[in-house]
Amino acid sequence: MPGIEQGLRHRGAVCDDKAVERNSLFDLTGRVALVTGSSQGLGLALARGLAQAGAAIVLNGRDEKKLTATAETLRAEGVKVILSRFDVTDGAAGERAVEKIEADFAPIDILVNNAGIHQRAPLAEMTEAQWRAVIDTNLTGAFLTARAVGPRMIRRGAGKIINICSVMSEVARPTVANYAAAKGGLKMLTRAMAVEWARHGIQANAIAPGYFLTELNRPLVENAEFNAWVCQRTPAGRWGEPAELAGAAVFLASRASDFVNGQILYVDGGLLAGV
Ligand SMILES: NC(=O)c1ccc[n+]([C@@H]2O[C@H](COP(=O)([O-])OP(=O)(O)OC[C@H]3O[C@@H](n4cnc5c(N)ncnc54)[C@H](OP(=O)(O)O)[C@@H]3O)[C@@H](O)[C@H]2O)c1
């Protein structure tokens, strides 16, 4: 099937013999990844994982000091890093930032929509501000950043988008209605991106973490009862370590996933496998 083979070679896909020889299916050398919310936590672990596979990193967050400190840490590890401070809920700021990254640095090959917040409250007491803040950051923020980067990827005929969902994309718990609605929405946004953009050489997928040890979850980790519940509810019997997300991210950012579209990869220690 020469037509098919030619198509795959054109896109640099798996039938590139040299790539296979170099074992470079997962190699990200020369790629540029914008990871939103990467000054700490899972975003930082995702950025570090992509960098270890060869990518240059655009760090993002709202707090300049945190970003600068994280950039220094990564540079000391030999990572090529630039900073792009913007709030993902501000569409115009995101557009300006993406334009600047591409003009001054390089085209964005990989977008990881990771920025997220929690504001917990019982549903009957949840304020409109709590609802809107979480939807704005965790769902609208991903839409706005993808809308800034996506058209550029479409023009280039290639790109990888990884949305950071959650087990809350599938199941809920008391006090997280805003978060579960946002992450459920993000799962469907991932599929919507895939059906519109796959034909343009863009693969949009999601990683859905279970419970990981980060600042976002500090109140839960420090709550002995909740901590025990997580360890009992997760078949692996423990919280996840942020670095354990890197493999999934490298897979979804690399040519190894060039025919994977609209999938949600649960990295949850088996949490969703049982009740
Ligand atoms: N930890 C878990 O167990 C877990 C499980 C499932 C899913 N997740 C998801 O994973 C993602 C990261 O979570 P995490 O635990 O690493 O959280 P985290 O430690 O609180 O880090 C959140 C990051 O997002 C940035 N951020 C927040 N709002 C932003 C905004 N409007 N614009 C730009 N950056 C913003 C923060 O920096 P600034 O405050 O400086 O902006 C920070 O770098 C979130 O989407 C979360 O929902 C986490």
Image (tube, rainbow, N blue to C red):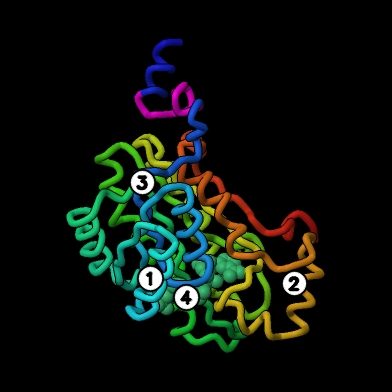
10 Å crowding of disc 2: few (<14), some (14-19), many (20+) = many
Identify residue for label 4: 134
Q: Which residue is mark 2?
A: 230
Q: Are marks 2 and 3 in contact (CB under 8 Å)?
A: no
The answer to whether one can see residue 263 in this image is: yes
On screen, residue 94 above or below 16: below
Relative to 172, residue 185 above or below: above
- Residue 196 visible within the image: no
Q: Is residue 263 magenta?
A: no
* Residue where numbered disc 1 is placed: 72
Badge 3 is on which residue?
31
Quadrant of the image containing the C terminus: bottom right
Secondary structure at badge 1 equals: helix
Q: What secondary structure is marked by label 4?
A: helix
- At 59% from the left and 85% from the top, the residue drawn is 121
Q: Nearer the viewer, residue 274 or 132?
A: 274
Name the amino acid, label 1.
Glu
Residue type marked 3: Arg
Left or right of residue 70, residue 149 in this image: left
* Span highlighted in magenta in the image: 10-20
Give whichever of 86, 191 is nearer the camera.
86
Dot 2 or dot 1, earlier in sequence: 1
Q: Amino acid at mark 4?
A: Val
Residue 191 location in percent, x, y?
Answer: 48, 48
Q: Which element carries disc 2, helix, strand or loop?
A: helix
Q: CA distance from mark 2 to mark 4?
A: 23 Å
Label 4 crowd bin: few (<14), some (14–19), many (20+), radius 10 Å = many
Badge number at residue 57? none
Q: Say whether disc 1 or disc 4 marks the residue closer to the N-terminus.
A: 1
